[in-house]
Amino acid sequence: MRSILEDYDRLAAVQYAHRWAYGRNPNFYDYENIGGDCTNFASQCVYAGAGIMNFLPTFGWYYIDANQKSPSWTGVEYFFNFFTRPQRSVGPVGRECLLSEIRPGDVIQLSFNGQGFQHTPVVVAAQPPYGPGDILLAAHSYDADDRPLDSYEYLLIRPIQIVGVIRP
């Protein structure tokens, strides 16, 4: 495995987000009616920018079909745990960051009740000074494209910056 992080294609992630924000890519199951599709959509967008999955059985980040996927592909907390993992393994790598560090292609997790996080939209645009009104999101489960962050009613926010990709 290479020890350096390779570039993450933010433009590809954003283009994918715009393309599928109000639709569903037929190559991926739509989990809307069984818990929500937001993290599945965020994973698809990040995959478009990273181009690689991690097929570790329990702790990886992958999608084969509706029944063969990692918990991190569709679960909000599992997604966060995979992206901020301390051990080096194949796939995209992220870190929790300040809102002022967020860029297009990153994700922001939202907590609506202050107890855990329930939503994972994708950043499609961000303008200085990078406050909630300066960041636009695309999402499933509350289908949106170019939706301002400050239009959501959330109690907690967790920005995740994608810092690169580890390849085999």
Image (cartoon, rainbow, N blue to C red):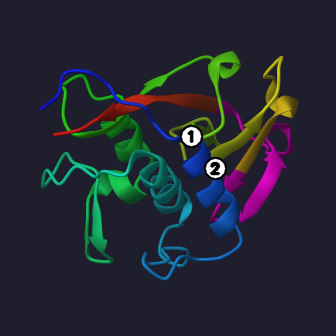
Say if residue 119 shows up in the picture. no
Residue at the extreme bottom of the image, as rendered: 26
Density class for disc 1 (Cα within 10 Å; few <14, some 14-19, many ≥20) is many
The x, y position of residue 49, in whole percent, is 48, 47
Q: Residues within 10 Å of mark 2 (few under 14, many from 20)?
A: many
Which image quarter is the N terminus in?
top left
Q: Magenta includes 154?
A: yes
**Which of the two residues, 147 or 78, is positioned nearer the viewer here?**
147
Q: Which residues are magenta?
A: 138-156
Is residue 122 visible to the viewer in this orientation of the structure?
yes
Residue at coordinates 18% horizontally, 34% vertically from top-left? Answer: 89
Q: Amino acid at mark 1?
A: Arg
Where is residue 81 drawn, in percent x and y? 33, 36
Mark 2 belongs to which amino acid? Val
* Image disc number at residue 111: none
Drawn side of residue 71 relative to residue 153, left or right: left
Mark drawn on residue 10: 1
- Asked if marks 2 and 1 touch (Cβ < 8 Å), the reply is yes
**Can you identify the residue that label 2 sits on?**
14
